Structures are given as C-alpha cells and as structure tokens.
Amino acid sequence: MSNASGPSFITVSEDDDGQRLDRWLKRCVPGLSYVFAQKLLRKGQIRVNGKRAKPDMRLEAGQEVKIPLSVMQTDKTKPFAPEKGKISDKDRAFMHSLVIYEDEDIIALNKPCDLAVQGGTKTKRHIDGLLEVFANKEGVKPRLVHRIDKETSGVLLLARSAKAARALGHAFKKHDIKKIYWAVVSPVPESYEGTIKAPILKSGGDYEKMEINEEEGKTAITEYAVIENAGREVAFIAFWPRTGRTHQIRVHAAKVLGCGILGDRKYRAIKDEESKRIDVNLGEMNVSRRLHLHAHRLIFSHPLKPGRIIDITAPLPNDLMQSWKALGFNHKYKQDPFEALD
C-alpha cells in the first residue's frame, strides 16, 4: 500500500482487492474510529476515485481512497504501514516452528495450548500479533480465517492474501471445510457414534460460557465417533463440528453426551465427587492436566486452485502424546472415522 497524490490519498493494493471499505479503513487507518469513519462516509468526506462511497462497498486494486487531510495529520491516525523489528528472534523462530503446511496462498500452524489466536484486554501475546513473521516482501501479513480456543491445540489456517481469505472464509461459512478434532472424554458415552443436534447460546451469567438453549440457541451440529476406550472411565473420541459455534464440542460433549473432555474446568459433565475420583485415577496414570482437545485435521478444497484437495494433520503435542500413551490409545490413528458421512 502506498501514498498517491498526497498524504490524504491511499492506493488500494492488489492484496486488498475485494475488501469492504469499512474493514479496509479499520486496518489501514487504525486511529480512525468506526463511528467517525461512518460520519465521514455519510458526509461524503471519504471518497473512492472521487465518488461518494458506502461502508460496504467492495474496493478494487488501484482505486484511490481519499481521507480528509485533517484526519491523516492527527497524532493517532496514520496510514497503515507494517511495523518492523518489534518481534524478537526467539518469537520468529517459535512461529516458524509451528508451520505444518504452506504454499503461495495459505499457511497452516499447529497452535499450542494456552496461546490465544487473537488479543484481548488481558491477552498481549497471541498468534495474530505475531503474524508479521510471515509478511511478504511488500509487508503484507497473512490473515486469520478462523479461530480455535486458547486452551485447544491444533490446526490453525492462515491466508496469504485477501482473495484467499475471502475464499476460505466462504468455505468455513458454508461448512465446506471438514474439521476433525481428537479428544479424551470421561466417562465413555453410552452410544459409540452419532450426531448431536443441540442449539447453543451464550449464558446470561458468563459471556464466555455457552449453554444448550432449545428455544433461543443457534443451530449446532456435531458428529462424533469413539475410536478407543479404557473400560467405562475414559475414551479417545473424534468430533466433527459441522457448525462452528463457540465451545461447541465442549458443550455438546459435557451437556449432551454427559462425558466432559478431560481438563475442561469450564464445562463439567459429572458430579464433583465423581470428578475428583476420576481425576485422581488419571493423575496416577501420568495424564496431562490440560484440556484434552486437539484440532487434529482439516480437509478442504484449495481456495485458489480448483480441484486440488488439501489434507492437513497436526501431530499431537508432547503433553497430549503423554496422555494418549498413558491411556494406551493409538496416537498414530490415521483413518477418517467420518468418511462415510461425506
């Protein structure tokens, strides 16, 4: 992205072709608030190629976006420019170590547990803040196209361009990307395979906690299949969330199957007394205390190469590998338990 005729003009780059104007403004003029941007657009003070523009207008590469000079000259509002040198060599090496697949259009990471995908009030270190590591020669960073919980490890997909991001975003929205998660649950579910259909809604008391709500909840569908079990206490189970609701697998496992995911302190499926008894037994078996949920595999059509199928697998991290081995589960399991459902 570069300045055009003067400091109040920004030329739309090839990478931003097709981007909504309001989203482009948020990224490229970070000090310009959403409310003020809407006001300037209504008054016609932000123009595209000299013409009035609406917030949802799709930009085209080469267009010139005019921003009032007074806005551009404020201390907090500057045209977008990638910041260099703020990421340590250690973090650069760390991010590169997470890469499990890449080509000219996409990157896939094996995200570790306890590292957030995006920032928040109390979250300063996160994947999104480290994506400069993968910036190209023009300074364009890859984009997030989906999220997984901070406590969950596994495949996280990035798009190298706006075009690839739009295609992948559309695929996620249409549920055209097959997501297979691995988990260890306790106790073993009564049925060893099935489809869970239970609407999910944010609970009133805790905005980060979800609940089953048949009347007001949003549609949530999860396929599941037990791969192995150790008696009736624990099972290695695969989940395929056909929809992408917050904490969907965790809620469906605990509240519908009645078998909470090991290490999930937010969603309990059984009474505290029984939970403590099982925790002690598992502790004696040298099982990790973290959330035993791993985004194991993504299968999808390449966003920009029709007909090319991408199949990415994220190996279990060491802490979960310890649990799988301790419980006698096959960490080398390669089958797709949902192949017949495609």
Image: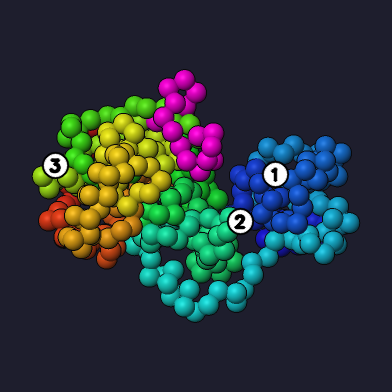
Residue found at x 56% / y 69%: 137
* Amino acid type at mark 2: Thr
Q: Residues within 10 Å of mark 3 (few under 14, many from 20)?
A: few
* Amino acid type at mark 3: Arg
In this rendering, does residue 169 appear at all? yes
Q: Of the numbered discs in the image, which one, if any, rests on residue 176?
A: none
For the stretch drawn in magenta, the main secondary structure is loop
Q: Of the numbered discs in the image, which one, if any, rests on residue 22?
A: 1
- Mark 3 touches mark 2? (CB < 8 Å): no
Say above or below: 53 vs 305: above
Distance from the alpha carbon under mark 1 to that under mark 3: 53 Å
Q: Residues within 10 Å of mark 2 (few under 14, many from 20)?
A: few
- Residue farthest along the top direction in this orientation: 215
Q: Which residue is mark 2?
A: 121
Q: Which residues are magenta?
A: 203-220
Q: Quadrant of the C terminus?
A: top left
Task: Please report whichever mark, 2 or 1, sits nearer to the chain's N-terminal start.
Answer: 1
User: x, y percentage for residue 68?
Assistant: 86, 52
Mark closer to the observer (2, 1): 2
Distance from the alpha carbon under mark 3 to that under mark 2: 41 Å
User: x, y percentage for residue 99?
Assistant: 38, 64
Q: Is disc 3 placed on a helix, strand or loop?
A: loop
Residue found at x 42% / y 60%: 114
Q: Which residue is mark 3?
A: 232
